[in-house]
Image: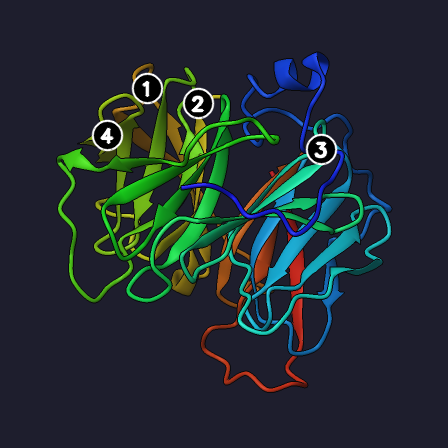
Amino acid sequence: MTPTHPRPTRRAVLGGATLAALAATVGAGTASATPNAAWPTGFPLPNGWLPEGIAIGSKPYAYLGSRANGAIYRADLRTGEGRVLFAGGTGLISVGLKVDDRAGLLYVAGNTGVGRVHDSRSGELLATYRLTPATGHFINDVTLLGDRAWFTDSRDAVLHGVPRGGRDGAVHALPLTGDWTQLPDVINANGIVGTPDGRGLIVVKSTPGELYNVNLRTGYATRITLVGQDTVVNGDGLWRIGRTLYVVQNRLNLVSVWDLDRTATTATLRGTVTDPRFDVPTTAARFGDRLYLVNARFTTAPTPETTYDAVAVSL
């Protein structure tokens, strides 16, 4: 499978320094700055936005996608102000996102069988990857690990690896085996992050609420033993820093915080984070000592005037 490029761009060929930067895992380390007390602890999104994904890189900007038309909004964490970076279009959806601001790229899970790559500064659509047929699949979330962006499909037991940063190569389909059992008519694979050693992927299975460590070479999925809480039911977005794993449990309006062991096959509950401002948060991204979450408001009937926002909690 090959990408379709809307137009030639400067991303088509990357210099050696950028390619070297792709070897690092994005979204798992510490941010380059720390929010201060003057920064807002929340910010609004456009009415009717229908958000689900949020991504933050090493700079104080949050990217938020729209399920309504695939649009992308960028907010300045220092002020809470933002603007629509990509206007979206008919038939487009944006759910999970990850930003690689060193390469100036934003990766977007497009739900209807596609993964997209945007310029993180201008919002320009650079590439669209057809991962699956448009129906019967749900490309839900994405993480960056090594030289690929890895996408989950909530309706199929397969992860999809897209070459990063304009690198040549086909999309790699990685079937999930081992302890993984695909369930019909529910959300299976959802949030995804790299393991602490960078050799595998951690995937949350929303129903019935399990975590898996996936071998990148074989696709063998080892169920992670949970200590202190039986499940992570309604598990949605994941965020990891070091051996600390944050699991957003959307309809429970909480984030469970886990300590991973050295092999990332056991997770021990450290505690939970909740806030009265939570309204079905779906995904999270950390900047400094704050965790930013987007409220999807799944229990509220959407209209063009429905309000949405993102909120920050201290860690």
Report the coloring of the rendering.
rainbow
* Residue 101 image label: 3
Q: Amino acid at mark 3?
A: Asp
* Residue 261 image label: 1
Q: Residue at x 75, y 53 (%)?
A: 74
Q: Amino acid at mark 4?
A: Gly
- Of labels 1 and 4, earlier in sequence is 4
Q: Residue at x 20, y 67 (%)?
A: 185
- Of labels 2 and 1, earlier in sequence is 2
* Residue 243 image label: 2
Q: Position of residue 165 (x, y in %)?
A: 61, 30
Callout in the foreground (1, 4): 4
Q: Position of residue 195 (x, y in %)?
A: 39, 24
Q: Which image quarter holds the C terminus? A: top right
Q: Secondary structure at mark 2?
A: loop
- Of labels 3 and 2, earlier in sequence is 3
User: Observer-nearest residue: 61 or 22?
Assistant: 22
- Of labels 1 and 3, earlier in sequence is 3
Asked whether the residues under the numbered discs 2 and 1 touch, taking CB atoms below 8 Å apart as contact, a structural biologist would say yes
Where does label 4 land, which residue? 219
- The part of the image, by quadrant, that contains residue 192 is top left
- Of labels 3 and 4, earlier in sequence is 3
Count of numbered circles in the view: 4
Q: Amino acid at mark 2?
A: Arg
Q: Secondary structure at mark 1?
A: loop
- Of labels 2 and 4, earlier in sequence is 4
Give the spatial CA distance, label 1 vs label 4. 21 Å
